[in-house]
Image: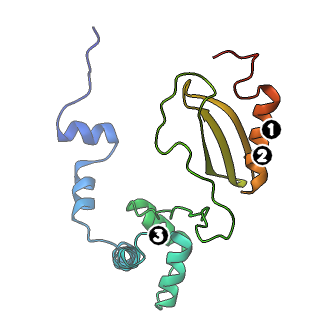
Amino acid sequence: MATCSLPIGFAGICTVLGVSESGYFAWKARPASRRQNQDLVLLAHIRAQFSTSSETYGAPRMHAELTEDGLAVGRHRVARLMRDNGLKALQKRRYKKTTDSSHGGPVAANLLDQDFGCDGRDQKWGADISYIWTPEGWLYLAIVLDLYSRRIVGWATSDRLQKDLARTWLSMRCGAQLPCDSRHPA
């Protein structure tokens, strides 16, 4: 078993770090520099603006706000102070309106009436359209679920939310197998 031969104690730590004890105590007793004092003042302004913005301002916007307030400060200095103090902007979630309840089109009847039970495949289907944010924009996903087997029997994706999305999954499903098709016994 190997043993550690490092010196122990304050003098040993100074030796390992390559500093003299008197140099450490001189550094410890030295007052904060002018720049360190300025950083503390700037940090107070940054924290106030950060709180006012509901923690949504990043360094570029924070720099603009501080400049508007008459503080002469560089953007990189603001970024450093925010980073060193854990001030990271929160991203607002994107919102996409997908439902228009006040349309003039026909509304389909609720045939299931919350009764999702069934005795065999292809008797009842459930469908849903969801949307997902991607780097290329919104992606819409339509799926059809067989309520008996809980398997997806049809799906389609599109970059637009239109009637064709539902038609695409329906034609995909019907091209492979019709509901209650004789080729697919329950």
Residue 5, image x, y percentages: 26, 22
Look at the numbered discs 1 and 2 and tell me whether their residues touch, using CB distance below 8 Å: yes
* In front of the other: 69 or 71: 69
As rendered, which of 178 and 154 lies closer to the eye? 178
Residue visible at 46% across and 87% down? Answer: 71
Quadrant location of residue 87? bottom left
Q: Amino acid at mark 1?
A: Ser
Query: Which amino acid is tagged 2?
Result: Arg
Question: CA separation, marks 3 and 1?
Answer: 45 Å
Q: Nearer the viewer, mark 3 or mark 2?
A: 2
Which residue is outermost to the left? 9
For mark 2, what is the residue?
167
Which image quarter: residue 17?
top left
Judged left or right of residue 161, residue 123 is left
Q: Amino acid at mark 3?
A: Thr
Labels 3 and 2: the sequence-earlier one: 3
**Category of crowding for the residue at label 1, using alpha-carbon neighbours closer than 10 angstroms: few (below 14), some (14–19), many (at least 20):** some
**Location of residue 50 in the rendering, given as x and y in whole percent from the top left corner:** 40, 74
Classify the position of the C terminus by image quarter: top right
Where residue 179 sits in the image (x, y, percent)? 71, 29
Mark seen at residue 56: 3
| Earlier residue among tags 3 and 1 | 3
Which of pointers 3 and 1 indicates the residue nearer the eye?
Answer: 1
Tag 3's secondary structure?
loop
User: Tag 1, which secondary structure?
Assistant: helix
Asked if marks 3 and 1 touch (Cβ < 8 Å), the reply is: no
Residue that label 1 marks:
171
Residues under numbered marks 3 and 2 in contact, where contact means CB atoms less than 8 Å apart:
no
Drawn side of residue 24 relative to residue 73, left or right: left
Alpha carbon separation for disc pair 1 and 2: 6 Å
Residue at the spot x=61%, y=29% of the render? 123
Tell me how far mark 3 sits from mark 2, CA to CA.
41 Å
